[in-house]
Amino acid sequence: MNRTLLIIKPDAVRMGVIGEILAQVEREGFKILDLKMVQLTREQAETFYAEHRNKPFFNELVTFITSGPIVAVLLESAESENGVKKLRMIVGATDPLASPPGTIRRKWGTNITQNAVHASDSPQSAVREIRFFFGDKF
Ligand code: CMP
């Protein structure tokens, strides 16, 4: 599975770093197959993050992700390798402060909620998340 989904979250959109984030993923070996800017409804966000429904941070997560437009980006790793794993290396850890220097979250994340981007965490999630934003087109 060399395809994966990246979401540029509302904090990064507000910061004006869409272009810089896209440039970094392209520079590090990904091709952009499709992308769209959308503002999720609460219901859509709850569906997208359904696996976190019982977590204590769920409400905060949904409120944040619906607080402004996001950019959903369908990526394909240039080489036939594990795109999910590769993107997660570039993105860094959930907590920006625990992310290695040079990762997207270390550069543009603020805290564990406002962490600039989301990346699919497994090939199964990637399939579901790509379908969520781009339907059966891919
Ligand atoms: P993301 O990759 O979008 O997937 C789920 C999100 O939940 C994650 O990024 C974080 O922003 C958020 N999250 C995960 N753990 C916590 C936590 N302990 N407290 C607050 N938010 C969290």
Image (tube, rainbow, N blue to C red):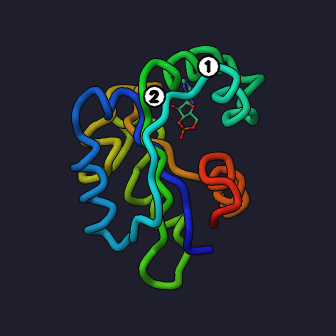
Query: Which mark is drawn over residue 88?
Result: none
Question: Could you say where residue 16 lies in the image, as x and y percent from the top left?
Answer: 22, 34
Task: Tell me whether the residue at label 1 lies in contact with that at label 2, contact meaning CB atoms closer than 8 angstroms.
Answer: yes
Amino acid type assigned to the residue bearing label 1 in the image: Phe
Above or below, 138 relative to 60: below
Amino acid type assigned to the residue bearing label 2 in the image: Ile
Above or below, 125 relative to 78: above
Q: Residue furthest front?
A: 137
Quadrant placement of the N terminus: bottom right
Name which quarter of the figure residue 93 lies in.
top left
Some atom of ligand 1 lies within 8 Å of the CB belonging to the residue at label 1: yes
Q: Is mark 2 on a helix, strand or loop?
A: loop
Q: Mark 2 points at which residue?
A: 112
Question: Could you say where residue 78 lies in the image, as x and y percent from the top left?
Answer: 42, 79
Residue 21 or residue 82, whichever sits in front: 21
Is 95 displayed left or right of 120 in the figure?
Answer: left
Residue 79 or residue 137, whichever sits in front: 137
Quadrant placement of the C terminus: bottom right
Q: Which residue lies furthest to the bottom in this view?
A: 80
Q: Which residue is drawn at 48% across and 46% down?
A: 72
Q: Which residue is drawn at 35% across and 27% down?
A: 11
Name which quarter of the figure residue 29 lies in.
bottom left
Some atom of ligand 1 lies within 8 Å of the CB belonging to the residue at label 2: yes
Is 30 displayed left or right of 88 in the figure?
Answer: left
Q: Residue at x 32, y 34 (%)?
A: 12
Q: Dot 2, how many residues are within 10 Å of its Cα: few (below 14), some (14-19), or many (20+)?
A: some
Q: Residue at x 37, y 58 (%)?
A: 90
Ligand 1 resides in the quarter of the picture at top right
Q: Mark 1 points at which residue?
A: 57
The Cα–Cα distance between marks 1 and 2, rounded to whole angstroms, is 10 Å
**First in residue order: circle 1 vs circle 2:** 1
